[in-house]
Amino acid sequence: MNLSSKQLRAFVALNEERNFTKAAEQCHLSQPAFSALIRALEDGVGTRLFDRDTRKVQLTTEGQLFAESARRLLDDMDHILDDLTEHVERRKGRVSLAALPSLAAGWLPGVFAEFRRLYPGIEISLTDTLSDQCLDLVRLGKVDFALAAGGTNTAELATRMLCSDEFHLVCRKDNALARQKTLRPKDLLNHPFVHLARSSSVRQHLDALLHPLQMNTVLEVEHLATVMGMVQNGVGISVVPALTLFHFQHPNLMTRPLDVPGLTRKIYLVSRADRSLSVAAQALYDLAIERRPDGKASSPGRASRKKIAT
Amino acid sequence: MNLSSKQLRAFVALNEERNFTKAAEQCHLSQPAFSALIRALEDGVGTRLFDRDTRKVQLTTEGQLFAESARRLLDDMDHILDDLTEHVERRKGRVSLAALPSLAAGWLPGVFAEFRRLYPGIEISLTDTLSDQCLDLVRLGKVDFALAAGGTNTAELATRMLCSDEFHLVCRKDNALARQKTLRPKDLLNHPFVHLARSSSVRQHLDALLHPLQMNTVLEVEHLATVMGMVQNGVGISVVPALTLFHFQHPNLMTRPLDVPGLTRKIYLVSRADRSLSVAAQALYDLAIERRPDGKASSPGRASRKKIAT
DNA sequence: CACACTTACGATATTCGTAAGGATT
DNA sequence: AATCCTTACGAATATCGTAAGTGTG
C-alpha cells in the first residue's frame, strides 16, 4: 500500500480532535475531502481505524494499535524533513575546502567572516596547503572544493578562474630598484634574490619567466613571512603575487608591480566534475566569487604604492 | 510537503540500484514515471538528492543526509503496516471475554479449541463469572464481549441472542419422578430440592416460575458440581439448564426436560453499543454464533434421556 | 550509435470542493 | 432544528505510459 504523510497527518489530527470537521480544518481540507482521506487510509490498511457516528469519533482496537506508531512515524518524518530543510536553507551544514596558504592568510579570512555572518550555522573546515595537495584533496573527496593556482586539465576536476594575481617586486626603499621608473625582468637579475621553495606556486610561476640560473639567489625559504623578514633586513629582494603583499606592509619596504605580460598567477576554484557541491559548499563557492580579489595591488589600503608615492 | 511511501521506496531503490531503469522496474513503473517521481521528491525537499548524468547516478551531499534517515523511516513504516496487517488477517491479536461459568466449563472449551486451531496467533483471556459481573466487565471495557444470561436493555450495550437454554430435571434413577410420564412444575414441589445461590442466573429463572416459598429447599450451593454431588447422593433433586447437563453424567442419575413454556434461559452475546469489536474479537464472536449450542439436551451424546430409556 | 536520463503529451486516476442526504440528539 | 458524518458529482490536478529528445562515451 501507499501511505502518505498527508494521511498520517489526517489520522493524527482526527485522533486528537475526535471530530472530522475540526480535524479537516487543521489539515486545510473540506470536511468531505478529509472524510475520503480517512476512508482511503482505512481501505489501505484493510480495516476501520475509527468508530464513528454523528456524536462520537473514537479509535477502534486496530486504530489504537496504529495510533501509537503513527505519531512516532510522523514525528520522525517531520524531524527528518526539517533537518534536511535546514541544510537546504543553509542554517545547518558543513563546508570543507583547501586553499593556498597565501589566500588562506590574506584574502580568505574576510570571506569567512562574511560567510559566518550570513550562515552562522554552517561549519567550515580549511586546509591551507600547497596547490598540488589542494587538488589531491579535491580528487579524493576530502574537501568540497579548493582555491588553487595550478591550471588542471584533468577531466575529473571542474575549474573556474577566480582571479588573476599580478606579481610585485618587494624591496627596501633604499634599494636602487626603488628609484627605477620601469621594471623589466632583467633588472632583477643582479640583485640578491630571496626565493620561495620550488614546491610553491609562486616559485613555479617565477621560474617559468625568469631563468633561475641567471638569478642571484641567496636564499630559498618556505614561508612568505620569512621572505618578508629577509627582505626587510636587506638580505635581498623578492617578487610575490599581489594577494600576498599584506605580508610586506612595512615603512622601510616598497612594492611595485612588475610589468611583465604573462607573469600572472591564476587562482582557480576547483571542484570535482562528477558531483555537485553541497548547498553549504555552493554558498561559500558563490560568496568567494562575489568577493573575488581583484589581484591588483591593494591589501586594504596601506603600505602600497600609493602610500609610498606620498 | 507531502512525502509518500511510494517516493521513499523509489528513493531507496534508486540509491541501491544507482540506475533509473532498474530502480523503475523494481517499483513497477516506467522509467519516465519513475524519473518524475524522483524529481517530485527533489522538488518537495527543495534540493537535488542525486547527481546524475547518462553514466553515473550518485547521491548528493543532501541525498546522503536523507538516505540515512529514509531507510530507517521506510523500514519503520513497513514494520508498522505489517504488524497491523497481521492483526487484520487474524494472525495476531487478543480477545478477552466474560462468560457464565456454566458456558465456560461446558460449551466454550470446544469453541476455544476450534478458535485456537483457526487463529493460533490470537491470545484469549476468559473471565468465568456470573451474569451481572459479565455485563459490568463489558460496560467497563474490560472485556470485548460477554456470554451472559440477563436480557439487558441498557442503551450502552448491544445484545444478540445466542441460544435458548431449556431446563431439565436432574434426579436419581430411583426417584419417583423418574417414572412419571409428564413433568409439571408442581410435581417438583414435594421433593427435597438442591438450589443454586440466588445470584446465579439459573436460580433467578427458576424463582420466576416456581414459587420459592412453596418449594422444599434443602440446600443452597454455589457450584453446579456441588449440586451434582448432592443429587447423586440422594440429598435432593434439582433443575438445571441443558447446557450444564454435562455435570450430571452418571449411571445412577437421570435427566429429563421440563415441559414448562417460558422456562428457558436465554444466552446472549453482549458487547458495547458504541464501539465495534476488534478483528480478533469479531472472529471469536462469529465463531460462537456459528458453533452455537442448540440448548436441547445433548452434551455429547451420553447420560441423557435416551440412554436412560434403554 | 548505443545507452541512459529527460521532455512532451494524451489518457486515465485521484483529489478536491460544493451540494445534497441521512442519522442522531 | 441543529449537528455531524457520508454520498454524489463535476472540476481541477496528478500520475502514468508511449514516444521523441538530448547528451555522453
Image: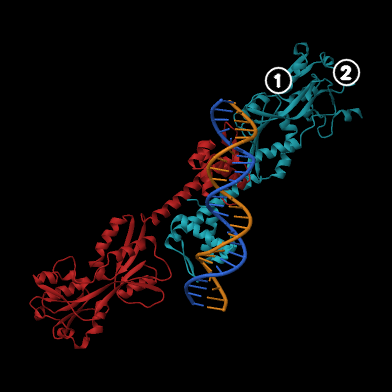
Chain colours: A red, B cyan, C orange, D blue
Relative side of B24 to A198, left or right: right
Counting from the top left corner in percent of width and height, residue B135 is at 65, 27
* Residue B217 visible, this angle: yes
Label 2 chain ID: B
Q: Residues within 10 Å of mark 2 (few under 14, many from 20)?
A: few
> Which residue is located at x 38 percent, y 55 percent?
A89
Residue matched to label 2: B176
The type of residue carrying mark 2 is Ala
Q: Is residue B155 above or below residue A209?
A: above
Using the image as rendered, state which of residue A283 and residue A50 is in the foreground.
A283
Relative side of A60 to A222, left or right: right
Nearest to N terminus: mark 1 or mark 2: 2
Quarter holding the C terminus of chain B?
Answer: top right
> Which residue is located at x 11 percent, y 80 percent?
A181
Do callouts 1 and 2 mark residues in contact (Cβ within 8 Å)? no
Residue matched to label 1: B197
Q: Is residue C3 above or below residue B1?
A: below
The part of the image, by quadrant, that contains residue B138 is top right
Counting from the top left corner in percent of width and height, residue B50 is at 47, 63
Q: Secondary structure at mark 1?
A: loop
Q: Secondary structure at mark 2?
A: helix
> Which residue is located at x 33 percent, y 73 percent?
A133
Q: Is residue B18 above or below residue A3?
A: below
The type of residue carrying mark 1 is Ala
Counting from the top left corner in percent of width and height, residue B101 is at 70, 29
Q: Residue furthest bottom?
A: A214
